[in-house]
């Protein structure tokens, strides 16, 4: 089978011949991959910043944002049958008996750092023709979402963040404010803005680029306010009860605190590299967080409930903004085009590889 393989040792990204996997356990399912999204994580792995092949393998098959179709189900599989569309989960539980999160099916909260992630660390990904996975790590999706379901995985990040936010804001015996700021207008930021709008938040998207880019126009088309941080500094953005950081910029995250309202929550989801030093007034930072009852929370990956939640949100987005949702996907390319999408800086918002 064709697959996009990364060899960290040889510093190579190339199309490789990968053996077709077989069902080995009754709870396993073979899926044919239909589409795989390309994101910044994939590009960073191709720059050898991180990524780890499975034990004994020279290469890591890339890809973690996938839509597949069941082609074969093991004898013990309960609810999936050939033809069902599925989105595979990315992170798998660790094996440590004492890891309470993984033993509770919440490997997104794993405390051991020994978990595997498809296409990222220690487990092959989905930029290949067929994969085998256990039923419990596959989430079914209806045929009505066939065109956009490749966006489910990036949307799970926001779904988990919103669940965290609901739990956090339950600390107050009154309704929290509904003004949201999204930092970043990439696919994760735009999907995040749409998810916030669905939940009734007055939503502003802030990114560096001017308001004339397709990303800015898409934000406006779904009803968000768009602000270019190059044109308007943080002091002019307004005041927000929730700030969702999806830009991967620590400086932007700290800058945005100036716009965080009392009792507000700053949610960090970007994963910047080390070495980004900032010179800031730590006294003022701590004082403001204390005197304004603010919370800063990091969140990564997502549990199964968030996959189901993301699929449900995607269905709502598909009804409310069908054109804008499709507008997020700005290119579908054959697997052989991986080099252009992974190693160059492609144009558009979200690029997809089609198997
Ligand atoms: Zn991704
Ligand atoms: Zn664990």
Image (cartoon, helix red, strand yellow):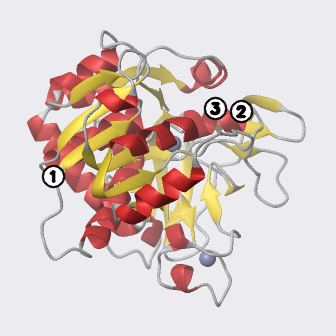
Instruction: Between residue 336 and residue 268, name the one nearer to us.
Output: 268
Q: Residue furthest top?
A: 212
Q: As drawn, is 214 to the left or to the right of 314? A: right
The mark lying in front, picked from 1 and 3, is 1
Disc 1 or 2, which lies upstream in sequence? 2
Dot 3: element: helix
Dot 1: element: loop
How many C-alpha atoms fall within 10 Å of the one at disc 2: few (<14), some, or many (≥20)?
many
For the question of whether residue 332 can be seen, the reply is yes
Q: Which mark is residue 43?
A: 3
User: Is 137 situated above or below 275?
Assistant: below
| Residue under numbered circle 2 | 46
Q: As drawn, is 107 to the left or to the right of 321? A: right
| Residue under numbered circle 1 | 199
Q: Where does ligand 2 appear, by image quarter? A: bottom right
How many C-alpha atoms fall within 10 Å of the one at disc 3: few (<14), some, or many (≥20)?
some
Quote the CA–CA distance across marks 1 and 3.
32 Å
Quote the CA–CA distance across marks 3 and 2.
5 Å
Q: As drawn, is 216 to the left or to the right of 346? A: left
């Amino acid at each position: 089978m064709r697959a996009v393989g990364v060899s960290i040792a040889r510093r190579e990204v190339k199309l490789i011949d990968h053996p077709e996997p077989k069902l080995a356990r009754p709870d396993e399912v073979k899926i044919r991959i239909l589409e795989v999204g390309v994101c910044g994580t994939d590009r960073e792995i191709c720059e050898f910043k991180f990524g780890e092949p499975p034990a004994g393998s020279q290469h890591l098959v890339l890809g973690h944002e996938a839509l597949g179709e069941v082609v074969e189900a093991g004898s013990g599989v309960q609810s999936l049958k050939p033809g069902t569309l599925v989105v595979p989960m990315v992170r798998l539980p660790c094996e440590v008996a004492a890891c309470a999160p993984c033993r509770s099916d919440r490997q997104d909260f794993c405390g051991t750092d020994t978990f595997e992630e498809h296409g990222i660390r220690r487990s092959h990904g989905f930029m290949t023709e067929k994969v085998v996975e256990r039923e419990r790590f596959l989430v079914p999706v209806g045929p009505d979402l066939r065109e956009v379901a490749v966006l489910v995985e990036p949307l799970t990040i926001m779904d988990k963040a919103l669940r965290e936010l609901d739990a956090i804001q339950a600390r107050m015996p009154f309704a929290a404010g509904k003004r949201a700021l999204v930092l970043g207008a990439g696919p994760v930021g735009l999907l995040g803005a749409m998810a916030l709008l669905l939940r009734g938040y007055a939503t502003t998207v802030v990114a560096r680029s001017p308001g004339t880019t397709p990303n800015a126009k898409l934000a406006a088309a779904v009803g968000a306010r768009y602000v270019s941080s190059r044109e308007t500094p943080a002091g002019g953005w307004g005041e927000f009860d929730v700030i969702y950081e999806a830009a991967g910029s620590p400086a932007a995250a700290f800058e945005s605190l100036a716009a965080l309202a009392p009792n507000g929550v700053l949610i960090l989801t970007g994963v910047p590299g080390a070495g980004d030093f900032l010179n800031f007034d730590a006294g003022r930072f701590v004082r403001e967080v204390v005197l304004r009852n603010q919370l800063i929370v990091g969140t990564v990956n997502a549990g199964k409930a968030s996959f189901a939640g993301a699929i449900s949100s995607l269905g709502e987005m598909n009804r409310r903004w069908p054109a804008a949702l499709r507008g997020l996907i700005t290119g579908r390319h054959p697997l052989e085009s991986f080099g252009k999408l992974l190693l160059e800086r492609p144009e558009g918002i979200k690029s997809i590889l089609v198997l």
